[in-house]
Amino acid sequence: MTDTPGGPPPLIDIEDFFADPAFAVPTVSPDGTRIAYLAPAHGRRNVWVRGIDETHDDAVCVTHDSRRGITTYHWTDDPRWLLYLQDTDGNEDWHLHRVDLDAPDEPAVDLTPMAPGSRVAGVDPLPAVPGSVLVVMNERPLYFDMFRIDVATGATTLVHEQDDPAATLHLDDGGEPVFHTTLADDGTLEVSAWDAATGQKRLLHRMGGAQHPMGIQPQQVTADGKGLLVGSYQGSDDLRLVRIDRETGEESVVAAVPGRSLDITGLMMPGVLPPAVYTRRRTGEVLAARFVGDRPHVEVVDPGFAEVYAALAALSDGVLGTVSSDDAGRRWIATFVHDRDPGVAWLYDHATGESRELFRPYPQLDPAALAPMTPVAFPARDGLPLHGFLTLPVGIEPRGLPLVLQVHGGPWFNDVWGYNSAAQFLANRGLAVLQVNFRGSTGYGRRHVTAAIGEFAGAMHDDLIDAVDWAIEQGYADPARIGIHGGSYGGYAALVGVTVTPDRFAAAVDYVGISDLANFMRTLPPFTRAFTVNNWFRYVGDPDDPAAEADMLARSPITMVDRIRTPLLVAQGANDARVVQAESDNIVGSLRERGVPVEYLLAEDEGHGFENPENRTRLFRAMERHFAEHLGARSADRPG
């Protein structure tokens, strides 16, 4: 962590950090003849397809969304059709759309026309019924039922109707139900074998509780249909990948790394983020598993994959990210996690051993001008080990710098080593950036996550203050120039920072953050209630319980708003289904009634976070001005 001679690099344009990537989310077709990926068109991310040996100049844009960028798409077993998910202006009412690769200029077809408030929650291939996919969606608002959709005709057939909103039926590769899981009232997951002939279930195993605030993840049937893969602590502090036997209910370890936990964060965006479990495309066999650490760790499970993994790992000094292969396991596309050169995609042919770089998502960014992300560790005031990451500006002596504490959302999530556009942008503006995996963050063991029970605006906030104090003690940070920003829970943390400890921060940014815990919980979509027993209800309380509600209000920034004197920037999406607009409106309205200056950015075409590049640019331009004025950061107006 030393300064780089020659002074700071030039300011990088905000658009270069926050424009949509030039290329992203590459995959190879099942037959290995084509590549699909996301790239800009019509001002948004759209899906492009090209031959395996062709370039982007030969590619065809097969989707034509000009309202909102596409993030998730799927090949099908028919080379004619490709599927993608899309919502409306960030409302998260996801619909499944079909495009015709033989007629890519034809309008997409919505295969799941549903009323507002209903959404597609999962899309999986169904090898037993060629031409079909398995879709989980809540046409009935409180219940996520399972349907088979014929891709060519759109014909939809009910496969399984749920009678329990907290239950899931798991099918094998042949489309037969083999496991049933349900979340009991006490937060325990009950795993049962399912008899397809009788529709009866046989209890195999109980597991879970508050140590699994995001649920038992993964829940995945093994390739042979005889086991269920789950994340389990098995009485230890580390989350392991475990197989539950369908006959006996016994657990056996599939992958475990002492001192590390299975990384389940990728399950939030399958196919986009690196997976918890890498599987063979055609058979579903487990190839490797991903674990949390100072750098992510990939643990190879399948001996046959070891040679492929070694060849892929040799392509980059980053860490393997997403992987896609054809059905034959010959052609592989891999992306890599890297702090300064993210998402570089390579094509590898296992038959010939040949490889070539496909693209860099951000060719406009020079890795040499970006800042390394360094893992750090220190104890909290009660001795709990804390892990985080420090990003220091390039070319500036790392002493007495203005520092921004960047708080992740969730809170049941974790910061990881890798490229972070916000951190890189702030570092380029001369700010040190500190991220800490405070108690409640996943990935650091059972003790770490459960230490957050009852500690919203308490020990969870103390961890953030302890992190700032560590940076000051190490000499990195100027105590008079500390800022805080974050999104979702991170926005709540920023508001807690300027209410509970108003003298510690010279500037704050609340991005789609919670201001009233009770109102937040009451305004969550109704179908989420069945899944909140081990997170919000266990860690914070039930807003319908008067005593719990009083405690929530005591931990809510809205009830301490009169303490705010720190310059504050608030950003909110009008269509946010998780943290409704009122959470920001109420904070801003209260401050303005008192005559306290606050800048408010409201995006009418956004939800829980800004996706459209013009809105991201608007947000970070405002942040640039905010931190320049109040922390002395560099900016377009003051580049020195």
Image: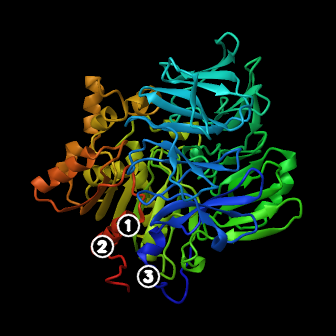
The residue that appears at 67% across and 45% down in the rendered structure is 76
Real-space Cα separation, disc 1 to disc 3, in angstroms:
19 Å
Q: Nearer the viewer, residue 67 or 183?
A: 67
Q: Amino acid at mark 2?
A: Arg
The image shows residue 343 at horizontal and vertical percentages of 62, 64
Coloured how? rainbow
The residue that appears at 79% across and 48% down in the rendered structure is 327
The residue that appears at 55% across and 32% down in the rendered structure is 136
Which residue is identified by label 1?
Answer: 614
Q: Earlier in the sequence, mark 1 or mark 2?
A: 1
Which residue is identified by label 2?
Answer: 625
Q: Earlier in the sequence, mark 1 or mark 3?
A: 3
Residue 158's image quarter? top right
Q: Give the mark toward the camera: 1 or 3.
A: 1
Q: Nearer the viewer, residue 97 or 630?
A: 97
Q: Farthest residue toward the bottom? A: 6
Real-space Cα separation, disc 1 to disc 2, in angstroms:
17 Å
Q: Nearer the viewer, residue 285 or 137?
A: 137
Which residue is identified by label 3?
Answer: 11
